[in-house]
Image: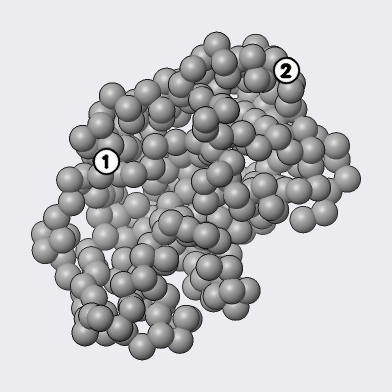
């Protein structure tokens, strides 16, 4: 990504999978990568001092508790990081005039709509992760008018951890078959595709509101797994199963395909098809 604009960007959660990709792909900006233990978004005073010191033009907020099942057993921590932490980031951005670009999730929806969710559909999360992220969205809107909320889903990227990496680890030759859920549908999305889309938003400082930045097209986890092994050239038997056969602590919505209406309305480039993005990921050997 080439950019001559001397925009100063602070990234929270820069050590995570998405954060690492953004640090690499947005390197033509003046970047300030931050993460634990030096930067704790749940400590409002400390985070305020960091924003006060650096005075970034843009804050890209990636830091979050994303372990969906763990959120069910650590409810206070989930809300502390995803809701209160986001409020702290938003309030600091508003105080010092920084534009906030924050990431959220398809899990803010209940999965009961027959067609893809657009940015104007009502949220109704079914698990603690989705509820805490949804509250984070609301607090961002309340505390920082100059914001963009970017919803993503089924994320994978260089270094992992992700579903892609898990599937490849399971295909170690010790299993005759791998069972994968076939009744949940979503948009597998590459962190690289997200970074490309985010650049277009960064370069449009007038944009505010919610954007869906998932790859085009949708599939089940089973379909996703089949494509992973096809693109990687690994022979592995995959068997479809139901969510009931693979219970998890957190209830998963069954259908969270995201429509990219906001990208169309603002005449921004389309997201790539999920199969193309995954194929490029393996071609570039980005594991």
Q: Residue at x 22, y 37 (%)?
A: 72
Judging by the rendered image, the residue that carries numbered circle 1 is 70
Residue 53 occupies which quadrant of the picture? Answer: top right
Question: Compared with residue 125, is residue 89 higher up or lower down, i.e. above or below?
Answer: above
Q: Is residue 59 above or below residue 277?
A: above
Q: How is the image coloured?
A: one colour
User: Measuring 26% from the left and 29% from the top, which residue is drawn there?
Assistant: 75
Looking at the picture, tell me which residue is in the foreground, 257 or 236. 236
The residue positioned 51% from the left and 24% from the top of the image is 41
Q: Quadrant of the N terminus?
A: bottom right
Q: Is residue 10 visible?
A: yes
Q: Is residue 268 left or right of residue 131?
A: right
Q: Looking at the image, which residue sits at the far front?
A: 37
Horizontal relation, residue 171 to residue 126: left or right: right
Q: What residue sits 85% from the left and 40% below the top?
A: 5
Residue 3 position, x and y percent, is 83, 48
How far across and how far down the image is residue 186, in percent?
Answer: 37, 58
Residue 53: give its label. Answer: 2
Q: Position of residue 279 (x, y in %)?
A: 54, 76
């Amino acid at each position: 990504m080439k950019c001559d604009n001397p925009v100063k960007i602070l990234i929270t959660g820069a050590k995570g999978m998405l954060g690492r990709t953004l640090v690499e792909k947005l390197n033509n900006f003046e970047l300030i990568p931050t993460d634990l233990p030096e930067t704790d978004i749940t400590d409002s005073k400390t985070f305020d001092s960091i924003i006060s010191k650096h005075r970034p033009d843009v804050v890209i907020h990636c830091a979050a508790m994303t372990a969906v099942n763990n959120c069910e057993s650590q409810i206070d921590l989930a809300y502390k990081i995803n809701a209160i932490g986001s409020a702290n980031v938003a309030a600091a951005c508003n105080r010092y005039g920084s534009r906030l670009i924050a990431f959220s999730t398809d899990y803010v929806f209940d999965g009961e709509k027959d067609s893809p969710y657009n940015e104007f559909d009502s949220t109704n999360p079914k698990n603690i992760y989705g509820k805490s992220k949804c509250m984070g969205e609301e607090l961002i809107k309340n505390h920082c008018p100059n914001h963009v909320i970017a919803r993503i889903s089924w994320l994978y990227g260089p270094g992992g951890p992700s579903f892609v990496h898990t599937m490849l680890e399971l295909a170690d030759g010790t299993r005759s078959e791998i069972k994968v859920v076939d009744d949940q549908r979503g948009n597998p999305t590459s962190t690289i595709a997200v970074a490309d889309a985010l650049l277009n938003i960064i370069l449009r400082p007038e944009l505010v509101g919610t954007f869906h930045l998932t790859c085009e097209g949708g599939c089940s986890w089973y379909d996703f797994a089949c494509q992973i092994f096809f693109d990687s050239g690994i022979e592995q038997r995959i068997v479809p199963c139901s969510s009931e056969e693979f219970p998890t602590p957190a209830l998963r919505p069954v259908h969270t395909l995201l429509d990219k209406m906001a990208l169309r309305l603002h005449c921004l480039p389309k997201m790539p098809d999920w199969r193309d993005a995954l194929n490029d990921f393996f071609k570039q050997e980005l594991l």
